[in-house]
């Protein structure tokens, strides 16, 4: 790991999942994204924008089994949420999220961003905040498990797990 305040070079092996989620004919669908989209926030946003949707277009990116980034596209607007802002000390994409949120240089711990990002889809902001705190406090909890639970609250757990990176999906007893 890099020392505090120094970001490590991008390592594709640290990408737990990169998934675009969208609606078609009123049903949730998901598509895996290549791990390299985690190199930068702009790459991730661009990849998620490629998914045409008649409803919400979402992106979920999990890194290092430690934190996740949620993206929701609403027309040209981008809504962002990160489960652990301290990740910005070591990960460039996390630092870019905080910069986009106007929180660059903050040394906070815990989630940051739009915690109401999924509120109209059935996931209460408080539940999202509590899940992030649980991820920080319970080291045995797998990031993919937590995000699959959150996806289930919205209605696309199966679609998410089908797209999760190998080693974390249903074929592996997930």
Image (spheres, helix red, strand yellow):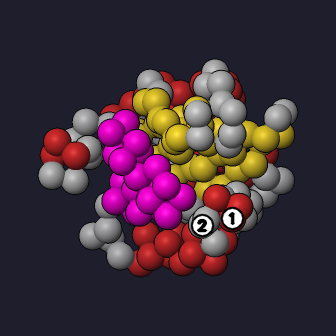
For image coordinates 43% across by 69% down, the residue present is 135
Q: Nearer the viewer, residue 130 or 55?
A: 55
Helix, strand or loop: magenta stretch: helix
Q: Is residue 89 above or below residue 57?
A: below
Left or right, 144 with reference to 140: right
Q: Is residue 2 visible?
A: no
Residue drawn 27% across the image and 70% down it? 140
**Residue 24: which quarter of the image?**
top right
Residue at 47% in and 35% down: 30
- Residue 119's disc is 1
**Residue 6 belongs to magenta span:** no
Residue at the front extreme, as displayed: 25
Q: Which residue is mark 2?
A: 123
- The x, y position of residue 26, in whole percent, is 59, 40
Residues drawn in magenta: 143-164
In this rendering, would 25 be left or right of 166? right
């Amino acid at each position: 790991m890099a020392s505090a305040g120094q970001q490590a070079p991008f390592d594709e092996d640290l990408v737990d999942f990169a998934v675009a989620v969208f609606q078609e004919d009123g049903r949730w669908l998901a598509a895996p994204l290549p791990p390299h989209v985690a190199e930068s926030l702009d790459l991730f946003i661009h990849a998620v924008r490629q998914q045409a949707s008649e409803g919400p277009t979402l992106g979920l990116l999990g890194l290092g089994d430690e934190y996740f980034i949620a993206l929701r596209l609403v027309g040209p607007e981008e809504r962002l949420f990160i489960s652990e802002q301290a990740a910005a000390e070591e990960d460039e994409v996390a630092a870019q999220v905080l910069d986009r949120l106007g929180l660059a240089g903050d040394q906070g711990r815990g989630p940051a961003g739009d915690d109401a990002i999924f509120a109209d889809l059935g996931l209460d902001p408080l539940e999202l905040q509590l899940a992030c705190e649980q991820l920080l406090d319970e080291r045995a909890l797998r990031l993919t498990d937590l995000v699959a639970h959150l996806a289930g609250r919205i209605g696309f757990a199966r679609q998410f797990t089908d797209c999760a990176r190998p080693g974390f999906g249903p074929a592996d007893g997930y």
